[in-house]
């Protein structure tokens, strides 16, 4: 079985930064995401963290 998730929190952060940098580089008005796992709806959720990184 092929496991695609990060093995450590550091690896997760590195992947998250790469994803956000790629999305920001698109310079699009609207972006649709498919197969981006979100682990909740609070301030520590994956989607919220992507938004925070994009505002750097």
Image (tube, grey):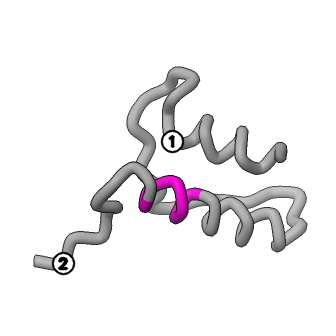
Q: Is residue 14 magenta?
A: yes
Contact, mark 1 vs mark 2 (Cβ under 8 Å):
no
Relative image position of residue 23 (x, y in whole percent): 73, 65
Q: Is residue 12 magenta?
A: yes
The kind of secondary structure the magenta stretch mainly shows is helix
- Mark closer to the chain start, 1 or 2: 2
Range drawn in magenta: 11-16
37 vs 52: above or below: below
Q: Tell me where residue 33 sits by quadrant.
A: bottom right
Residue 2, numbered circle: 2
What residue does disc 1 label? 46
**Total labels drawn:** 2
Quarter placement of the N terminus: bottom left
Relative image position of residue 2 (x, y in whole percent): 18, 78
* Mark 1 and mark 2: Cα distance apart in space: 22 Å
Q: Residues within 10 Å of mark 1 (few under 14, many from 20)?
A: some
């Amino acid at each position: 079985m092929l496991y695609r998730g990060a093995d450590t929190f550091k690896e997760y952060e590195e992947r998250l930064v790469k994803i956000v940098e790629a999305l920001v580089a698109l310079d699009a008005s609207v972006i649709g995401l498919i197969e981006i796992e979100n682990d909740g709806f609070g301030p520590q959720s994956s989607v919220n963290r992507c938004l925070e990184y994009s505002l750097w």
